[in-house]
Image (cartoon, rainbow, N blue to C red):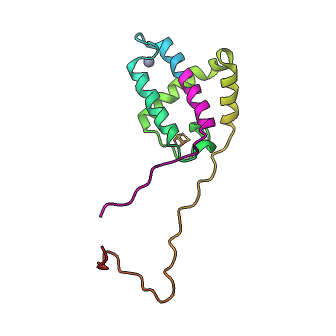
Amino acid sequence: MAAKTTEFVTDPSFVRRARELKTIDVMVRMYCRDHHDNADPLCPRCVELMRYAARRLERCVFGDAKPTCSNCTVHCYTADKREEVRVVMRYAGPRMLLRHPVLGIGHLIDGRRPAPKLPAKPVRLAPPVGVEDAAPGSDTGDG
Ligand code: SF4
Ligand SMILES: [Zn+2]
């Protein structure tokens, strides 16, 4: 029988992640414009990086309470994408304060935020008294 799944939902207001998405978009554009020839406004590789970063942000387990990804305790990025973002940040980060001071200061403040503790995994409750736990893999006959 297929496992039950539910839609993955995080904070629907998305305020902080929307701002972070704008910040990384600005940084990737800045990097792409200064390093890649076919930027219009982004080269295909940077388009792919932005799509990836947007997906990760949308599904971040911390929701809008997220730390900056560099302070994260989970690190959901693949190693190669993490390295790509690190290179972009190293170039664009210092330039943000001059060219986009509001986003740049917001990013600096966010960088001081520690990663919140994730909730503990749900504890499996013991069955009520008098009900025996079924052996793993046993067929109860009801479906
Ligand atoms: S690296 Fe951490 S903070 Fe960044 S999107 Fe992934 S889980 Fe969220
Ligand atoms: Zn590019």
Between 48 and 72, the residue placed more toward the observer is 48
Residue placed farthest to the top in the image? 37
Q: Residue at 40%, 27% (x, y): give it.
A: 48
Q: Position of residue 23 (x, y in %)?
A: 59, 26
Residue placed farthest to the bottom in the image? 130
User: Residue 6 occupies which quadrant of the picture?
Assistant: bottom left
Q: Residue at 46%, 36% (x, y): give it.
A: 55
Q: Position of residue 15 (x, y in %)?
A: 63, 36
User: Residue 19 occupies which quadrant of the picture?
Assistant: top right
Q: Is residue 109 left or right of residue 13?
A: right
Q: Quadrant of the N terminus?
A: bottom left
Q: Position of residue 109 (x, y in %)?
A: 70, 33
Residue placed farthest to the front in the image? 142
Q: Residue at 44%, 28% (x, y): give it.
A: 49
Q: Quadrant of the C terminus?
A: bottom left
Q: Residue at 35%, 80% (x, y): give it.
A: 135
Which region is colored magenta? 1-26
Q: Position of residue 114 (x, y in %)?
A: 66, 44
Q: Is residue 47 left or right of residue 125?
A: left
Q: Is residue 104 left or right of residue 132?
A: right
